[in-house]
Each structure stands twice: as structure tokens, then as C-alpha cells.
Image (cartoon, rainbow, N blue to C red):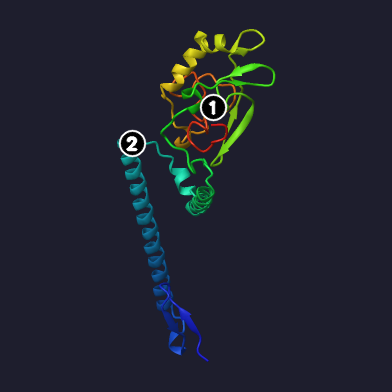
Amino acid sequence: MQEVRFEAFGEPVKYNEACVATPQRLISSRVMLAGTGLFWSLVVVIVAARAIYFVRSMIADATARNVSLKVAELLRFDERRLQDVEESFGSAKAVAQELGVDLQLPNTVPTQVRRCEFIEDGSAFVSWDGDLHPCYFLWHRFQCHLAGLVKGVQPWTFGNVANRGILDTWNADEWRSFRGDVTAYDFPFCYDCNLAMCDYVADGDFEQDCHISKVPCAACLWFTGPFQCLR
């Protein structure tokens, strides 16, 4: 029975007595192995160089279009899972339409087009202790999660109904200024930022974001679409 061996590129080599090792054959074999190793090393370098060029071109194109791009998040993106969610949402919408139900579903990914319906619609939230808050995002302490990112939130309070009426508090300079800052919509898009969550917005002790905005709305999941409750 003949023993079959394979050379470096996968071609079968039949072993026979003529293949008995000699110094010349050993040298030739080692040279070929070294050459093969060099060849595959060059292939890896070329593929890596092309990948780097592609990523840099993608980043440059995104920058030219004024689009923020988080490359690491793109590489981890689970497109199949997103497709499954969108198919489930599509089925739910079809059933709701048949039953005459007005079904409002969230975005499957955050959008860069921001709109605060709480502020735009003139909302005010009164918590159990009478404190007044501008929206559902800022009425209590919690953490929200998206794509591996964690955002801490602290309540944002403008007064208490025991001390001043809702209408007077609503028309006070502090709350009016807050509404104006929100509807200016000058916020960073945290979920595509390569530094997210940075210490500007990650913790609940908010002072300002990287756009120097004094309102803590940049990472709001109602603001960017994934949350829909109470809207």
C-alpha cells in the first residue's frame, strides 16, 4: 500500500523508494516550505492592506456626508438578528391592520434624525412625590441599554407642585430655556460614536455633552427612536 502525502499547496505526492531523503532533497524541501510560508504571509499582508484601505475609504466617505461611523460596531453588527426582528414587526403590523389596531412599533436601530415628541407636544410628567419633569426619559433613575452600551439616567426636576403650580413652573425661565435647548436639536449621535459611552453622558451626573449642550438628551432612546412607550 502506497502512502500518500501532500505538498504545501495541497497537491498529492506519492511516496516511493525514489523519494528517500537525501541532503539535496532535504534542502529543496526546506526551501519550498520557506517559500510557501513567505507566499501565505504576503497573501495575509495584501488582504489586510485591502481591508484597511476599504475601511479608510468608508470612513472618508461617511465624513464627507457628515455621517458618524462606528467601525467596531459595524463589524459586530448582527444583520440576521435585525432581519428577524423586522420580520416579526412586519407580521405584527399585518395582524394589527387586520384587527383595526393602531400599533406603534419602535425603530429597530437608532436614527440620526431626532425629534422629542414629549417637548414638541408640550408634555410634563408629575412623579409620585409631586416633582415636575420634562419627559419620560428624565422622570426617574434608571439605566438604558443598546448594542452593548449602557447609559445611566438621573431624574431632571424643575420644581414640585406643592411649592408652585404646574403652569407657573412650565412658564418659568428654567423650563422654557430647557425646551429651547432641546428643540435646537444640536446633539451628538452617541450610538455611532467611537468613544461611546464617554464620561460626558455615560453616568447620571450630567453637566454637558461634547457639543456643550446642557440638556442630557443625546443618548435618549425615545429621542432616537428605539423606545416608544408613553409617546
Could you tell me which secondary element the residue under label 2 belongs to?
Answer: helix
Number of dots carrying numbers: 2
Q: Residue furthest right?
A: 129
What residue is disc 1 on?
199
Whole-percent x, y for residue 34 in the image: 41, 66
Q: From what the image shows, is residue 19 above or below residue 88? A: below
Residue 131 picture quarter? top right
Q: Position of residue 199 (x, y in %)?
A: 54, 27
**What amino acid type is highlighted by mark number 2?**
Thr
Q: Residue at x 39, y 36 (%)?
A: 68
Q: Earlier in the sequence, mark 1 or mark 2?
A: 2
Q: Position of residue 25 (x, y in %)?
A: 41, 78
Q: Label 2: how many residues lie within 10 Å, few (<14), some (14-19) or many (20+)?
A: few
Distance CA(mark 1)–CA(mark 2): 24 Å
Q: Residue at x 66, y 16 (%)?
A: 130
As rendered, which of 7 and 148 lies closer to the eye?
148
Look at 53% across and 92% down and name the residue there: 1
Residue toward you, 212 or 195: 212
Determine whether 34 is above or below 185 in the image.
below
Instruction: Tell me whether circle 1 and circle 2 mark residues in contact (CB < 8 Å).
Output: no
Residue 78 position in % (x across, y down): 50, 51
The relative height of residue 131 versus residue 92 in the rendered view (above or below) is above
Disc 1, SS: loop
The dot on residue 63 is: 2
Q: Residues within 10 Å of mark 1 (few under 14, many from 20)?
A: few
Q: Specify the quadrant of the image occupied by residue 136.
A: top right
Q: What is the number of the mark on residue 155?
A: none
Mark 1: amino acid: Asp
